[in-house]
Image: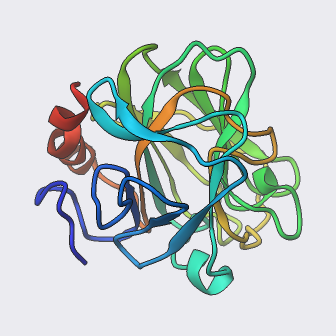
Amino acid sequence: MAFHHSPKIITDGLALSLDAGDKNSYPESGTTWTDLANGISFSCINTLTPFSNVSGAPALSFNASGYWQSTGGTSQSDKVNIAGDTTVILWLYGYDLSVRKTIFEKVGNTYNSYQQEIAVTWETAEHLSWYSRYNTYSYATTSALDIGEWNMMAIKMSTGEGAAARTGFYSKNGSDWTSAWTSRSSTAITKAGDIRIGSGYAGTVVDGAVGAVHCYNKMLTDAEIKQNFNAQRSRFGV
């Protein structure tokens, strides 16, 4: 596992690490984005999301068409177990969105994505909402992303692989975790399929940009999420 963006990012439990600013992950062109943790390959679907410096940071910009999806099938996507204890970190450049769209999900292969492992929606009020579990999905929302700035928005959940209620939390820019979860189901989660970034059940993201995506097969602590933020904040000018 080689990380050139920073020696300080937490690697314990790291299951997915996509970084537009690391040429080993994205070589500044092409339709392949490679995960640095498990070697999961992502392909751009539809119109390529352009690579550029967005407010000083290397990033891929959304364009209402292109999105990224893992290509290794469940043998690869299962390495990112969002049905269990999990943390998802998204470095996003905030825009004034006019239509809600899906920013991150594991594709539903039995039910809708938001009724399986996870679906995360970027809302018009600039916050993220996320959903998990069948049948009456559980859900939560984050605080709002800052428009015209880079934001590190993170969410975490306890396992939903059994009947116990999941717990959910969010953190913005390395802040201590804030509890935010409404549990409405005790049904054990059915594992989902491929991982998508920039599209899903609510459609393809129109504006904004993504700089990095990190997923963990564990719930990061307050100290760990702060460490991750401090490891990358200078690159994103936050």
x and y, in percent, of residue 114 in the image: 77, 50
Residue 37 in sight in this render: yes
- Asked if 58 appears above or below 11 in the picture, the reply is above
For the residue pair 95 and 75, the one nearer the viewer reads as 95
x and y, in percent, of residue 23 in the image: 29, 61
Give the left or right position of residue 12, taking residue 214 as reference: left
State how many labels appear: 0
Residue 205 found in image quarter = top right
Q: Which residue appears at 81% of the width and 46% of the height?
A: 201
Q: Which residue appears at 43% of the width and 55% of the height?
A: 29
Residue 124 found in image quarter = top right
- Asked if 3 appears above or below 183 in the picture, the reply is below
For the residue pair 31 and 94, the one nearer the viewer reads as 31
Residue 186 found in image quarter = bottom right
x and y, in percent, of residue 190 in the image: 77, 71
Q: Residue furthest left?
A: 7
Q: Residue furthest front?
A: 29
Q: Which residue appears at 61% of the width and 48% of the height?
A: 48
Q: How is the image coloured?
A: rainbow
Q: Residue furthest bottom?
A: 75
x and y, in percent, of residue 52 in the image: 39, 37
Q: Which residue appears at 37% of the width and 53% of the height?
A: 28
Give the left or right position of residue 131, taking residue 5 as reference: right
For the residue pair 4 and 155, the one nearer the viewer reads as 4
In the rendered view of the protein, which quadrant contains the N terminus? bottom left
In the rendered view of the protein, which quadrant contains the C terminus? top left
Residue 80 in sight in this render: no
